[in-house]
Image (cartoon, rainbow, N blue to C red):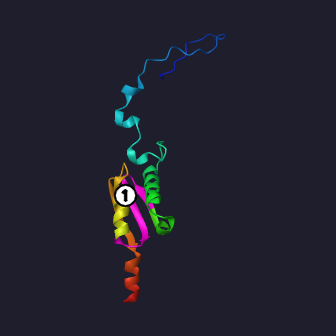
Amino acid sequence: MGIYQCKHMTHAESLEPADPLPFEWAKAFPSWFQTPPPERIGLQGEYDYHGLQKRVEAVFSQQFVPSELERLTVSQRGRVVILQGVVSDHAMLRELVSLAKQVEGTYRVETAWVTCTAEQNLMMAI
């Protein structure tokens, strides 16, 4: 039987729900299951599957001008922030990684797919 039980009725009676069974939701699930994980919290504190990515992008946009970030993409895999694209130099990349690590919910930052403009210019000169 479910939580909502109906009384047996005769032909002329209407359905009336019986008293619900006493149930305390707070004790039904562990505390870690009652709140979203930090990587799934959005910009306004709401549940957002891509919340960590959006919060990292917001921090980046506060620290850099949009033209510096136009060739960079941010994504997430769970608590891992993934940076891809082109940045101006290694100092900027280090700053981006440092900022991303400060965002709540970030476990690691991957930069394997990021190249620097200075490196690209050097490779073209050779």
Query: Up-down: is 12 above or below 57?
Result: above
Q: Is residue 13 left or right of residue 68?
A: right
Give the dominant element type of the magenta stretch: helix, strand or loop. strand
Q: Which residue is drawn at 47% across and 66% down?
A: 69
Pointer 1: what residue?
99
The x and y percentages for residue 58 are 47, 55
Report x, y in % for residue 100: 37, 57
Q: Is residue 58 above or below residue 30?
A: below
> Start and end of the magenta stretch?
74-90
Give the residue drawn at x 38%, y 57%. 81
Regarding residue 112, the answer to whether it shows in the image is: no
As for residue 5 lying within the magenta part, the answer is no
Amino acid bearing label 1:
Leu
Hey, which quadrant is residue 89 in on the image?
Answer: bottom left
Q: Quadrant of residue 53?
A: bottom left
Nearer to the camera, 14 or 53 = 53
